[in-house]
Image: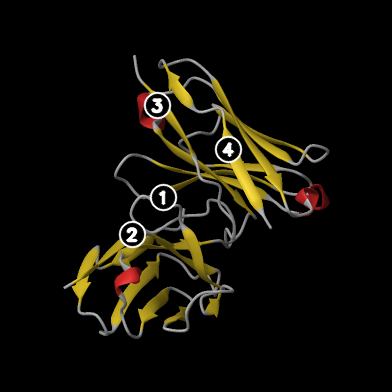
Amino acid sequence: EVHLVESGGGLVQPGRSLRLSCTTSGFTFGDYAMTWVRQAPGRGLEWVSFIRSKDYGGTPEYAASVRGRFTISRDDSKSIAYLQMNSLKTEDTAIYYCTRRGIYLDYWGQGTLVTVSS
Amino acid sequence: DIQMTQSPSSLSASVGGRVTITCRASQDISNYLAWYQQKPGRVPKLMIYAASTLQSGVPSRFSGSGSGTDFTLTISSLQSEDVATYYCQRYNGAPLTFGGGTKVEIK
């Protein structure tokens, strides 16, 4: 059974950094792109970033709102995806979901809440 | 960037009634369109991909249609457990844009 579990969220001050992790099991992690999606309180879904599988170059893509501040990475040996978030802003406050694939998103984690506030 | 516009933003229908949600892309996206269901307080769930392919386990009362710029999600007979917000999402390249969502309630 496919499982994705996010961790690393919490309360952080504006301008600081946070790293989210997505620990996966139940599938061959290296065969899939991985995507982060966020949802601000009471708002809709917003795509943040994805990273392609090594077979497709392992390259990332970012939403304009986070480009230059966030970095996605993956460790295929540990089946974990990461999202390094720097220079955080109050508008980054959201639940961050880890999802499988870089096209339609077929499996989702439960999400981790990131609150950016002074 | 390609914009995805959903309509209506909310609707209410009777149990057993037919529900239709529309998603319009600002450019041709072929059939690279997915639909998600998010029940209150829950994680989004993939319902349909490739515009009309039902994800495994999704009830057959759900269906999707369309190609190019205009797409539709239909619930043929609304059930109480279908109360949720529904999102469309394009995936023909980055960014993977979501529509603004349609909240479905029971009348």
Ranked by sequence position, the earlier of labels 3 and 4 is: 4
Mark-to-mark CA distance, 2 and 3 = 23 Å
Callout 3 secondary element: strand
Query: Mark 2, mark 3: which one is toward the viewer?
Result: 3
Q: Earlier in the sequence, mark 1 or mark 3?
A: 1
Element on which disc 4 rests: strand
User: From the viewer's perspective, is the residue at label 3 or at label 4 nearer?
Assistant: 4
Q: Check chain identity for marks 2 and 3: say if they share one.
A: no
In the displayed structure, A18 sits above or below A72; it is above
How far apart are labels 1 and 2 at the CA level?
8 Å
Residue under pointer 3: A115
Q: Amino acid at mark 3?
A: Thr
Query: In this rendering, which labeled residue sits more in front, label 4 or label 1?
Result: 4
Say what amino acid the circle numbered 2 marks: Gly
In screen coordinates, is B2 left or right of A61? left
Dots 4 and 1 on the same chain: yes
Give residue A99's position: percent from left, percent from top. Answer: 59, 50
Which one is in front in this view, the residue at disc 1 or the one at disc 3? 3
Q: Residue at x 45, y 58 (%)?
A: B2
The local secondary structure at tag 2 comes to loop
Cβ–Cβ below 8 Å for labels 1 and 2? yes
Helix, strand or loop at disc 1? strand
The span from disc 3 to disc 4 (Cα, nearest Å) is 15 Å
Q: Tell me how far mark 1 sits from mark 3, CA to CA.
A: 16 Å
Q: Are marks 2 and 4 on the same chain?
A: no
